[in-house]
Image (spheres, rainbow, N blue to C red):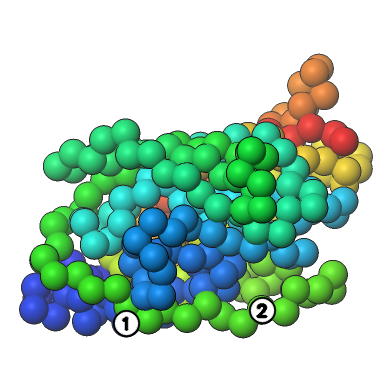
Amino acid sequence: MVQDIREVSPDEHWEAFEELWTGLISYRYLNKTTPALDTGFADDELESMPLRHDMRNAHGGIMAAPLAIGCPEPSWNDDLVVPAPVVSFTQILDDARGVNRIEVYREVINFGRQMGFTRSKVVDAADHSRVISTSAGMGVSLGDVPDGYEAVENPLIPVEDSPDMPRLHEVFGVEKGDDGWYRLPELSKEFSAPHAALHLGPIHIVFDITAHELAEQAAGTDHIQVENWYVMFVKPGLIGPFRCEGEAIAARSGRINVNLTLFDEGRDNRTITTGSGVFRVV
């Protein structure tokens, strides 16, 4: 069972958060930095993430999931509330060929009592005039947190970049079932948000592999590039396994939209997340 931080006393909250936060691999495996929460960063340092071979598609273009995880929306951090995402949008403007690292410029639209809204711009860390993507999102506060947060040591997981490295969905335990659909395993600490629900990272990853496969089948080629990525978090994923289904819709323009739905099989196939990706042939 994964501990829900909302059930911890205020005196134990930050100790529990540190255990849960450092156990989550979504950001640590992708080597995404979170200066607002972790030690070792300057106050004005931007969030950043490398772009590795496992974050690119068959022809070297950027995939959607790494960008959405590297720039999670909304940017309503755990030192302010117990946050949960509701919806996020990512528009990919550049396929990021030749880009080794990205950085994120954040903009808070509004943080209210229960809802938070942010938007961001992702740029090439070596050339901030090169914009890779833009994003926006909305989330909710599941509860207040006590004062006194102190940054924690949250070391990144050493990952050697190479053309034959495991794909992200393989590392995150995503497997295809006999019915042809991809699944995430049952909820575990490594894939759980602090409020004991499936984290956005694994969700984006299982959506990405499903969307790419369906779009490639519809296009008749693996030379495709994602342009738009939309995810709506409907309900928390609490048990699992989590099955992802999808449908590709080809338009006369040549664009392909893939609609996606994630089900919690341990909760009577309850729909927990929906989304879509728009692809073009390159």
Query: Which is nearer the eye, 88 or 218?
Result: 88
x and y percent of residue 69 in the render? 53, 56
x and y percent of residue 7 in the render? 15, 72
Q: Which residue is mark 2?
A: 159
Quadrant containing the C terminus is top right
Amino acid type assigned to the residue bearing label 2 in the image: Val
Instruction: Give the residue drawn at x 13%, y 57%.
Output: 144
Would you place residue 110 above or below residue 46 in this image? above
Query: Which is nearer the eye, 223 or 92?
Result: 92
Q: Which of label 1 and label 2 is nearer to you?
A: 2
Tell me which label, 1 or 2, sits earlier in the chain: 1
Picture quadrant where residue 9 is located:
bottom left
Q: Which residue is mark 1?
A: 19
User: How far is the residue under mark 1 from the one under mark 2?
Assistant: 22 Å
Amino acid type assigned to the residue bearing label 1 in the image: Glu
* Element carrying mark 1: helix
Quadrant containing the N terminus is bottom left
Picture quadrant where residue 281 is located:
top right
The answer to whether any part of residue 246 appears in the image is no
Along the horizontal axis of the image, is 5 left or right of 241? left
Along the horizontal axis of the image, is 160 left or right of 24? right
Would you place residue 149 above or below residue 255 in this image? below
Picture quadrant where residue 165 is located:
bottom right
Is the C-beta separation of discs 1 and 2 under 8 Å?
Answer: no
